[in-house]
Image (tube, rainbow, N blue to C red):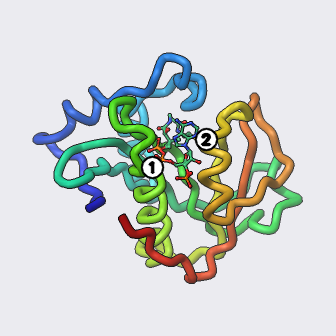
Amino acid sequence: MIEFRNITEDNIEEVIALEVEENQKEFILDTTNLRCFANAHMLNKEGIPAAPLAIYANDRMVGFLMYIYDTTDHESFQNEVNYGKKTYFIWHFMIDKRYQGEGYGKLAFGKMLMDIETMSHGEAEYVDLFYHKRNVRAKELYASFGFVETGIIQEHSVHALKKLDKKITEVTE
Ligand SMILES: CC(C)(COP(=O)(O)OP(=O)(O)OC[C@H]1O[C@@H](n2cnc3c(N)ncnc32)[C@H](O)[C@@H]1OP(=O)(O)O)[C@@H](O)C(=O)NCCC(=O)NCCS
């Protein structure tokens, strides 16, 4: 069973210790879970809702994710359908190297989208993200959930967007 838990005093060390493979570090733009957690804290302070969450499978921490709810207003998106609109943006998503390839990424990603669909931070028509152009596993995973590339590429990262239609069906184990 996949569940998400908030980051607390009790699990922060474990979140920090989660790792991707050496050759996957460029896929997460050499960021760290700790850095993302700090970003989430700063964004929340600025009034931009950010959800940093630990991913658990059968009570064991296997990964970490973060998404935010913000207005897409950077000029590079001005030709996009979500420009000027509130959008859920998936900032970070990782499964620890010990637990990859066991289906947890797919289950957790599906659950994250279902959580986003509840619009708990506010209404939005779209969810978007970036992935490194060589990250084939992420590309296929996101495409399987309906993300479509927009053509925007920033520093080797490909932008993809999905319209939220509240029709995501639960991925079962
Ligand atoms: C990308 C990532 C989140 C996927 O999580 P995962 O638990 O390894 O993936 P899953 O086991 O759920 O498999 C998801 C899909 O990935 C592909 N996949 C899984 N293992 C694979 C492998 N060893 N080689 C190639 N593709 C693989 C499959 O297409 C699979 O879909 P399918 O089950 O329909 O065939 C994880 O590998 C990861 O954290 N990678 C490093 C960080 C990263 O790239 N994050 C994304 C940043 S945008």
As rendered, which of 113 and 86 lies closer to the eye?
Answer: 113
Residue extending farthest top: 22
Residue 45 in the image: above or below residue 84: above
Residue 33 in the image: above or below residue 84: above
SS for tag 2? Answer: helix
Provide the residue designation for mark 2: 137
As rendered, which of 62 and 157 lies closer to the eye?
Answer: 62
The residue at the point 68 percent across, 34 percent down is 132
Identity, as a three-letter code, of the amino acid under mark 2: Arg
The residue at the point 58 percent across, 27 percent down is 29
Residue 82 shows which numbered tag?
A: none
As rendered, which of 43 and 136 lies closer to the eye?
Answer: 136
Residue 18 location, x and y as percent?
32, 30
Q: Is residue 119 left or right of residue 14?
A: right
Q: Is residue 67 left or right of residue 38?
A: right
For the question of whether residue 13 can be seen, the reply is: yes
Residue 7 location, x and y as percent?
24, 47
* Labels 2 and 1 touching (C-beta < 8 A): yes
Q: What is the CA distance from the residue labelled 2 to the residue labelled 1?
A: 10 Å
Provide the residue designation for mark 1: 105
SS for tag 1? Answer: helix
Tell me which numbered mark, 2 or 1, is placed earlier along the sequence. Answer: 1
Q: Is mark 1 within 8 Å of ligand 1?
A: yes
Q: Is mark 2 within 8 Å of ligand 1?
A: yes
Residue 107 location, x and y as percent?
42, 59
The residue at the point 48 percent across, 55 percent down is 106
